[in-house]
Amino acid sequence: MKQAIAYLYKNLISARRIRTTLIASLTLATFVSISDAYACATCGCTLSTDWGSQGVSTKEGFSADLSETYINQNQLIYGNSKPSAAQVQELYANGQEVETATMTQTTTVAFSYNSDIWGIGVQIPYLHRTHGTNGTTTNNVIGENYNESTDSGLGDVKVLGTYSGFSEDRTTGIIAGVKFATGNTSANFLSGDPLDAGLQLGTGSTDVILGAYTSGTISTYGWFVQGTVQHAISGLVSEASGSYRPGDAYLLNTGIRYAGFGSTFSPMLQLNLVHREYDQGSSVPNDVFTGSPASGGNLAYLSPGLSVRLGGGTSVYGFVQLPIYQNVGSLQLVPQYIASVGVHQNF
């Protein structure tokens, strides 16, 4: 079941309270770093190799969430446009490889518990990623050194806490958490060469996550705004392909839901913005033309979605994230869309 990166937020309106559930799956708010084989720009939920989902809810008690995301990164862009044949050839002429495709499927299991004003949750991603790269020979013959990789396993686990005691209706809060270095960082290409740091299932770094959110209602519409920043607190990590440290990632998400169809069907629309700083380390190559690290960038997605309540505290949801702006450092792969589906259960 191929579905992509996921970002889900649910706002359920009751007497003086809005429940906002934010689910962002590993691909949309994230860039994957780029190393010698020019990894992907948005490899599922990352900032790491997995910038997993974020959940915030003001409903007391336990909840669980299972989501499936899929991203097929098969479009090369240089900066904010398609690269010219001359640009690509120049990269080959300088001994750099160019990606052909990166496909990432992520299954994320999340559990959370909320008291009156406090909440805590854990997000556990499992990734399957395939990647292909074209190289060159000394005669600059494109594709003669084609290399590929396939890897599956646990990604980087996140633990997030929330506090919503700033207002009586609990619609405003803060987020604080940690991303742990649980994902594999030692995968190789099928040829035996080390896989790029930005394509590994984990970043090898321990990151802190800080953010805030608020929500409200206007007539039959509910709305939310959420912002987060993720910062690696560990230094350069030694990996098979060299040292590596992911750049800081900034996310701003805002959206609305329509409640005019009753409590069963909830159409939603989100705007997801991502800014990713340059990655650091010897595994991150410099751009041939600018000399800057070949990583980082800015992305914007418009994301329509739908949530359906099935009864008994169960709901299902789906989102399609459509890129409306892409500006990346150097040459990177981007997807044409990101799809995500999931099921949420309140206990």
Image (spheres, grey):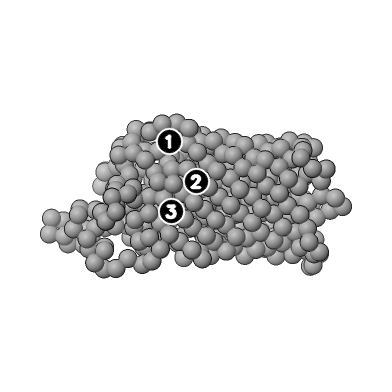
Amino acid under label 1? Answer: Gly
Q: Please give left or right for residue 145 compared with residue 106 in the image.
A: left
Question: Dot 1, crowdedness within 10 Å: few (<14), some or many (≥20)?
Answer: many
Amino acid under label 2? Answer: Ala
* Alpha carbon separation for disc pair 1 and 3: 21 Å
Residue corresponding to mark 1: 204
Who comes first in sequence, dot 1 or dot 3?
A: 1
Amino acid under label 3? Answer: Gly
At a point 69% along the width and 61% down the height, the residue shown is 256
Could you say which quadrant of the image residue 316 lies in? bottom right
At a point 43% along the width and 43% down the height, the residue shown is 247
Task: Please tell me whether mark 1 or mark 3 is closer to you in this view.
Answer: 3
> Would residue 64 be visible to someone looking at this image?
no
Judged from the image, the secondary structure of the residue bearing numbered disc 3 is strand
Residue corresponding to mark 2: 249
Q: Residue 328, how many percent across, how many down? A: 40, 56
Question: Dot 3, crowdedness within 10 Å: few (<14), some or many (≥20)?
Answer: many
Q: Residue furthest left?
A: 139
> Would residue 260 be visible to someone looking at this image?
yes
Q: Residue 251, how many percent across, how many down? A: 55, 50
